[in-house]
Image: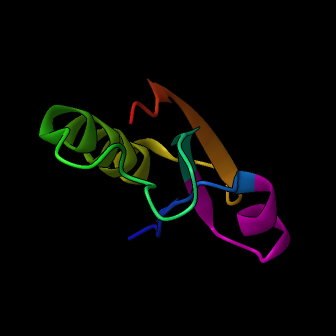
Amino acid sequence: MPTVIIASLPTVAAQLGAPRIATADTPMGAALGAPKDTAQQQRILTAALRLQETAVTPGETAYLPESYRS
């Protein structure tokens, strides 16, 4: 089963050899989205799990259409 990293800094994750990366426009420490925004957190997590199912190439990065709202 493929591994997916949810990363706020995809460049760093790629440099460290992450197998597959899901990333959204979020700050460090909030890779799943804004606090208490459970809908956004669920969307990011679901997209990462979808990448796990569909990823073909090692090192693949999925840029998610989410941005952080404080």
Q: Quadrant of the C terminus?
A: top left
Q: Along the horizontal axis of the image, is 48 left or right of 41?
A: right
In which image quadrant can residue 54 be found?
Answer: top left
User: Residues in magenta?
Assistant: 11-21
Q: Position of residue 8 (x, y in %)?
A: 59, 54
Whether 58 is among the magenta residues is: no
Residue 42 image position (x, y, % from top left): 19, 42
Choose top left, top right, bottom left or bottom right for residue 17.
bottom right
Would you say residue 20 sits in the magenta stretch?
Answer: yes
Residue at x 47%, y 70% (from the top left corner): 3
Q: Residue furthest right?
A: 15
The correct choice, above or below, for 29 with respect to 64 in the image is below
In the rendered view, tell whether residue 63 sits above or below residue 38: above
44 vs 64, left or right, is left
Picture quadrant where residue 1 is located: bottom left
Give the residue displayed 45% in from the left and 34% down from the top.
68
Q: Residue 35 appears at what percent x and percent y?
A: 26, 49
Residue shown at 16% from the left, 46% from the top = 36
Q: Nearer the viewer, residue 58 or 41?
A: 41
**Does residue 20 appear left or right of residue 2 in this picture?**
right
> Residue drawn 45% across and 55% down?
31
Residue 61 horizontal/vertical position (percent):
65, 45
